[in-house]
Image (cartoon, rainbow, N blue to C red):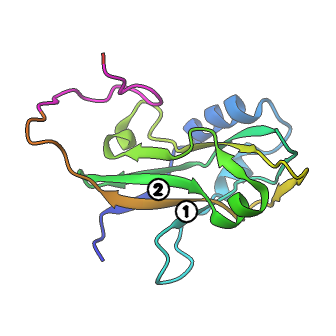
Amino acid sequence: MKRIAKFEKVSYEQFEKDYIDCIGETSENIREIYDGIKLPKRATTGSAGYDYYSPIDLTLKPGETVKIPTGIRCRMENGWVLMNYPRSGLGFKYRLQLNNTVGVIDSDYYGSSNEGHIMSKMTNDSNEGKVVEIKKGTGFIQGIFMEFGICEDDDVDAVRDGGFGSTTAK
């Protein structure tokens, strides 16, 4: 196996800012939540996906959406991308879905203005009336590293200057 990446926590200041943006003002101790963040891990030697662990308890009724600041960023080699998906069991049992279907984390996102903070916006799309409960420290999405190629005549020389939507072709 190639070792091409490393997960890290974003700074406390970045997490606090994004937590308030995602969750809103809260009486919860954000520092305690930040200190409890676990880096993504594979469950077994045969697992392709790295499980991200929820930093807080979540309850999603059918049709509800939540944006979760993971507190995680990922440094990876050029030529690789991190693809984030809901954990299979949550998608199968509850139709829990990422709002952007697949979270594409480019290698240059690590150096963006938000420190490359990986967010996850999820919706409980259950048509069976099922409520999803995700406890703090439980895996809720998984990331898979994939190598990619580029076209022979590719001449892109642009550099990322931000976070979400910053690479849109002009």
* Residue type, label 2: Glu
| Residue numbers of the magenta segment | 155-169
- Are discs 2 and 1 less than 8 Å apart at CB? yes
Disc ID at residue 167: none
For the residue pair 147 and 10, the one nearer the viewer reads as 147
Residue 29 screen position, x and y as percent: 79, 45
Q: For residue 8, which numbered disc appears in the image?
A: 2
Rate crowding at label 2 as few (under 14), some (14 to 19) or many (20 or more) other CA atoms within 10 Å: some
Image location of residue 149, percent across then percent down: 21, 51
State yes or no: residue 162 in magenta: yes
Q: Which comes sooner in the sequence, label 2 or label 1?
A: 2
Residue 80 percent across, percent down from the top left: 30, 54
For disc 1, the neighbor class at 10 Å (few under 14, some 14 to 19, many from 20) is: some
Does the rendering let one see residue 137?
A: no
Residue depicted at x 83% and y 55%: 132
Identify the residue at horizontal 77%, vertical 46% (top origin). Answer: 124
Work out whether 49 lies above or below 26.
below
- Is any atom of residue 63 visible in this view? yes
Q: Nearer the viewer, residue 74 or 146?
A: 146
- Residue that badge 1 annotates: 39
Which residue shows up at 77% across the image and 63% down it? 93
Identity of the residue drawn at 31% across and 29% down: 160
Q: Is residue 68 above or below residue 32?
A: above
Q: Secondary structure at mark 1?
A: loop
- Give the main secondary structure of the magenta stretch: loop
Position of the C terminus, as image quadrant, is top left
Question: Is 70 contained in the magenta span?
Answer: no
Q: Which one is nearer the viewer's eye here, 125 or 60?
A: 125
23 up-or-down from 11: above or below: above
Q: Amino acid at mark 1?
A: Leu
